[in-house]
Image (tube, rainbow, N blue to C red):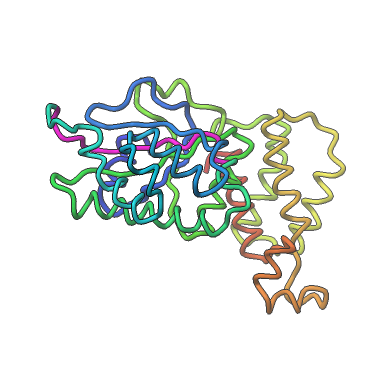
Amino acid sequence: MILEEFLRAAGRHGPCVGLLLTPAPSTPPDGVEYRSVDAQYITDLDALFYMFAEAWNFPAKFANNHNKDAFNDWIRDLDNLTNPCLTDPPARGYLTELRNAHLFLPNQHEVFGWFANAILLYREYYRDGAEPPASFGLLLSAPRNRLIAVQSRWLKEGIQVAVVEALGTEDIFLTVSVGLPASRNAMKYESLISRFINDEVSVAEFQTAYLQMFKTSVDILARDEFDILQYLFISAYRYGPDTDPRWQLLAAHPELRRYLQQLGEQELRADAYDVYWQLFGE
């Protein structure tokens, strides 16, 4: 979807977190307050508070009382923070771009989970409680070879993630190669991945065939294509069937399974679908 569609969705009941596949807009959309935050500096909760407070001009007193409750209060007061004298028309949307989203809160699983789910609460406030209502959303941007990992992390928290393919009609020419025709060498993987995600081959057949194909291929791939296909190679390598005695204990303990990064069938199929979408645009 383009940015306008994302704004409409965020202002209603659609996704309010978007994965950016294009550069950020050079100027914000009309009537939208747009801020950008560099996630590489957000390594813990205090850093999250500081970066968002700086971007959205929280009052100085927030620095002396920077807890989750205070953060919740101020993030739901962006209309007053951005238009304190009421000299401008009310904004129709509030968007924050999280640059380098692949570096956001590393190893801070609880903080990440809290923040990811808080985005939904902020959206609900601006949709149902603000006067006038407005859209609220978070845009995630990252290097192309990190997009799948970024999307997967948010999806694992149960957060719906929209794919923002273009920021506007004038920016469509800027679209990166995600979704554009893959190279001839990358296309050799298309049939196998497609058959797998369409249940035409079993997970065991796919694992064996894909690992063999990737390990023995001598074809030259573009760097981005190689990174994406290698991501699926690692996923296929980590797959372990629940019926395999080596994995039966892990199947009964999902937390241990995740800790050891062992994937089940549905997780491998989800990764294959993501890779298919990234390379072949469907």
Residue 154 appears at what percent x and percent y? 51, 52
**Residue 208 image point, x, y percent:** 81, 57
Q: Nearer the viewer, residue 35 or 171?
A: 35
Residue closest to the eye, 4 or 257: 257
At a point 84% along the width and 39% down the height, the residue shown is 217
Q: Residue at x 37, y 31 (%)?
A: 35
Say if 144 sits above or below 25 in the image.
Answer: below
Per the rendered image, the range of residues in magenta is 88-102
Q: Is residue 209 left or right of residue 29?
A: right
- Residue 177's quadrant in the figure? top right
Check the image and report above or below for 151 versus 205: above
The image quadrant of residue 277 is top right
What residue sits 61% from the left and 39% below the top? 146
Per the image, is 90 magenta? yes
Q: How many marks?
A: 0
Residue 42, given in percent of the width and then of the height, sits at 53, 41
Query: Which one is in front, 166 or 136?
Result: 136
| Residue 186 belongs to magenta span | no
Residue 9 drawn at (x, y percent): 30, 46
Image quarter of the N terminus: top left
Q: Residue at point 47% right, 60% down?
A: 158
